[in-house]
Each structure stands twice: as C-alpha cells, then as structure tokens.
C-alpha cells in the first residue's frame, strides 16, 4: 500500500506502519465511534446485494486490522442477515481476547446456526428490545450469544451500554441504516472509506440512509492510502 497522506508519501507501508496509520486517537472522550465502509466510485454500497464485490485485498486487510484494533464491532442486523458474518478472529492488540461483535436488532431475527454464533472466539452481544420474541431470544442464548435487552436502540443508549462494559473504541461496520442513525445523532467520530475502482450502476443505496433533515457535517482528511486503483481514506469529524 502506498501512503499518499499524511505527507511525506510512503511507497510501501509495512504492517506496523499500517497499524500506526489507523491508531485510535490517544486523547478521546469515550465512546469514540469509527465507521468502516466500502463504496463504488458512483456511491453504491453493494454489488448484487453484498459488499464483497467491492473490496480488494488491501480493503480486506484494513477491514481485519480495524477489527483487531477495536474494543467492539457494532453492526446492524440487516448487514448480518445479508453478509456471511463471523466473529473477530484475532485478539485486539494488547488484549487476550478478540473484541465481541455487537448486533443491533429490534426483532432478534438472527440465524442461531450462522457464523455469527458458530465461527467466533467470544460470544456476540445481541442488543435488542423487550418486544423481541422470547423464542428468538432463547434461541440466541442457546447458540451462545449474550442477549442484552435495552429500553431503546438509539445511538445514545447503545453507546452508553458499550461504554458501561468498557468498550469505548467502537468500530461500526454498518450498515447504511445504522450509519444513518449514528449520523443523525451526531455520533460518528471517524469514517474509514474504501473507494473501489468500479462503476456499479443499478439501484444500490449509499453508505448512509437516515432521517431527512440530518445536518451535513464537515470531515477532515486524516489519511489516504492507494492500492492498485482503490483509495483507502480516513476522515475524522472536524472539531
Ligand atoms: N459496502 C459496505 O461497506 C457495507 C457495509 C455494511 C453493510 N452493507 C450492505 O448494507 C445492506 C444492509 O443495509 P441495512 O441498512 O438494511 O442494514 P443495517 O444498518 O446493518 O441493519 C438495519 C437493521 O438494524 C436494526 N436496527 C435496530 N435499531 C436500529 C437503529 N436505531 N438504527 C438502525 N438500525 C437499527 C434493525 O434490525 P431488525 O430488523 O432486526 O430490528 C434494522 O432492520 C446489505 O446489503 C449489506 O451488504 C454494505
């Protein structure tokens, strides 16, 4: 990977330099929410309903690195249902166990036989509501998930619950509905976006889908990497 920004350019970033490039800010108010997405040049968030057709090897490498650096991976149930979703495979740097995946779902409609439960080293947290059917909640517990019933699934409640568990470095892997909700609540601190060298066309949505009227928020470029024809951008909220 070629580092274009910050200056000076670095033609061949090694693993340590890549991890340093994505280091969490040292001073921060907890929680700090980093969001990671990949999109086509024309803004499509999926090809054939999945994100897999968009990312190249560098995007996959950064996807796994960001997981390893986080304290928790937050994701909406729509993404878990659409993608083959598993747990984080390697421990967070400096920790003994990998971060858990925390799934936001009002319905608790998750397949207990899916990789979320069967291919993970730590139990996933299922953040849900009292209204979720008891049978589904029981099946999740049976499959090894931890069901966490919250009063609301709004960003303030979700992030407060994670912070209460000491999970302040939050990596959100989407999808667009969850990003839309986080953006509307002004809870996005950082966006890591891979721009894939592809015109997707079709009717795929954008990376965020939220309530109309959410104000546009300026972001500041922290980093830019290039690999093949893809750009891997890192933006942080402008103070
Ligand atoms: N290109 C990329 O980087 C990327 C990344 C992620 C996802 N995707 C794609 O995005 C698509 C899924 O998009 P999506 O918007 O349906 O998925 P999503 O944001 O992952 O999930 C939406 C679901 O999350 C639950 N939810 C509960 N409270 C919520 C809240 N406050 N805000 C938002 N969601 C809440 C609901 O689940 P219940 O219905 O269970 O209540 C809702 O249906 C898939 O095709 C996936 O491949 C692409």
Image: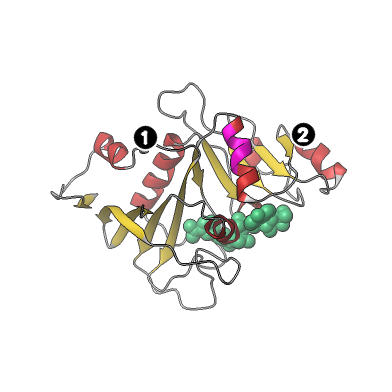
Secondary element under disc 2, as helix, strand or loop, is helix
**Label 1 or label 2, whichever comes before in sequence order:** 1
Q: Please identify, in this view, whether the residue under mark 1 or under mark 2 is nearer the observer.
A: 1
Identify the residue under disc 1: 27
**Res. 26 image quadrant:** top left
Q: Is residue 236 left or right of residue 47?
A: left
- Whether the magenta-drawn stretch holds residue 59 is answered as no
Q: Is the magenta stretch mostly helix, strand or loop?
A: helix
| Disc 1 element | loop
Q: Residue 192 carries which label?
A: none
Q: Distance between the residues labelled 1 and 2?
A: 36 Å
Q: Residue at x 59, y 56 (%)?
A: 178
Most extreme residue toward the bottom is 202
Residue 99 place in picture, x, y as percent:
53, 33
Instruction: Quadrant for residue 229, please give it.
Output: bottom left
Residue sitting at x 54%, y 41%: 73
Residue projecting furthest to the top: 96
Residue with the mark numbered 2: 141
Q: Does the residue labelled 1 lie within 8 Å of ligand 1?
A: no
Q: Can residue 232 be seen in this view?
A: no
Number of marks drawn: 2
Q: Position of residue 194 (x, y in %)?
A: 37, 58
Measuring from the top left, give residue 202's x and y in whole percent.
51, 78
Q: Disc 1 vs disc 2: Cβ atoms closer than 8 Å?
A: no
Residues in magenta? 159-163
Q: Is 13 placed above or below 95 here?
A: below
């Amino acid at each position: 990977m070629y580092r274009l920004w910050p200056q000076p350019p670095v033609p061949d970033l090694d693993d340590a330099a890549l991890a340093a490039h994505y280091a969490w800010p040292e001073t921060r108010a907890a929680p700090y929410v980093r969001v990671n997405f990949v999109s086509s040049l024309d803004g499509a968030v999926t090809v054939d309903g999945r994100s897999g057709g968009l990312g190249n090897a560098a995007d996959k490498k950064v996807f796994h690195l960001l997981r390893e650096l986080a304290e928790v991976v937050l994701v909406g149930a729509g993404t878990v249902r659409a993608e083959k979703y598993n747990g984080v495979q390697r421990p967070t740097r400096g920790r003994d166990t990998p971060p858990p995946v925390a799934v936001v779902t009002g319905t608790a409609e998750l397949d207990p036989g899916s990789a979320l439960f069967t291919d993970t080293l730590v139990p996933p947290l299922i953040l849900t509501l009292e209204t979720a059917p008891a049978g589904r909640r029981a099946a999740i517990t049976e499959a090894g998930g931890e069901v966490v019933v919250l009063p609301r699934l709004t960003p303030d409640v979700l992030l407060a619950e994670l912070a209460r568990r000491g999970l302040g470095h939050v990596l959100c892997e989407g999808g667009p509905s969850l990003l839309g909700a986080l953006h509307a609540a002004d809870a996005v601190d950082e966006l890591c976006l891979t721009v894939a060298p592809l015109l997707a066309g079709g009717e795929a949505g954008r990376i965020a889908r939220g309530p109309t009227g959410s104000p546009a928020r300026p972001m500041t470029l922290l980093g830019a990497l290039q690999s093949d024809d893809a750009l891997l951008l890192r933006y942080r909220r402008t103070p």
